[in-house]
Amino acid sequence: MLGNKLPISKNTDPAKVDDWSPFENLRREIDRLFDEWRLPSRFLGFDVPRLSNVAGTLVPATDIAEKDDCYEITAELPGLDEKDVEVSLANGTLTIKGEKSENKEEKQKGYYLSERRYGSFQRSFRIPEGVDADKIEASFAKGVLTVKLPKTAEAKAEKKIAINAG
């Protein structure tokens, strides 16, 4: 048993319940770090919006990678089918939208169970210059959406720059 006793106060004001919560503080700190640490996406030329922390909002995990001939965006969408997902491009912004709804009913002797679950999401990415918008492709397999944004010939070309003697 510890020798020091700490005073305990009960806060009955619901507006101040989260004034001191170690898990709430940890969550806020982690959110802040992830909001600030967006270098890879900025470095690749993508403008990735900050994630909102609204209760009930689904935010799929996404990865952005640059390859020799294209950029590739992968989004984890477990439990969804390709018919539940929409990919569109407008004004240089690639948008991934999806919605999931599930109804479950069980009728057994002595009970009746009815459950409904639903949710939707939307993620938008500003695509970098040098992407051939007419050749963008999307595929969906095993709950993972892959969007390939092929580079134009000019974006793939490597230019040698002469170094002048000082």
Image: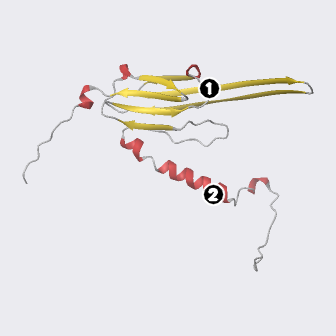
Placement of 51 over or under 133, stated as above or below: below
Q: Quadrant of the C terminus?
A: bottom left
Q: Which residue is mark 1?
A: 99
Placement of 103 over or under 49, stated as above or below: above
Which amino acid type is marked by label 1? Glu
Foreground residue among 104 and 149: 104
The span from disc 1 to disc 2 (Cα, nearest Å) is: 31 Å
Query: Is residue 46 in view from this perspective?
Result: no
Foreground residue among 100 and 11: 100
x and y, in percent, of residue 54 in the image? 64, 41
Which amino acid type is marked by label 2? Asn
Placement of 38 over or under 86, stated as above or below: below
The answer to whether the residues at label 1 and label 2 have Cβ atoms under 8 Å apart is no
Find numbered disc 2 in the image and state the secondary structure of the residue it sits on. Answer: helix
Q: Residue at the location (61% across, 35% down)?
A: 58
Find numbered disc 1 in the image and state the secondary structure of the residue it sits on. Answer: strand
Q: Nearer the viewer, mark 1 or mark 2?
A: 1
Q: Residue furthest front?
A: 109
116 relative to 30 in the view: left or right: right
Q: Is the residue marked by circle 1 packed among few (<14), some (14-19), or many (20+) residues within 10 Å? A: some
Q: Determine which quarter of the picture holds residue 21.
A: bottom right
Q: Residue at the location (56% across, 36% down)?
A: 60
Q: Quadrant of the N terminus?
A: bottom right
Q: Is the residue marked by circle 2 packed among few (<14), some (14-19), or many (20+) residues within 10 Å? A: few
Q: Which residue is mark 2?
A: 25
Indicate which disc, 1 or 2, sits on the residue closer to the N terminus.
2
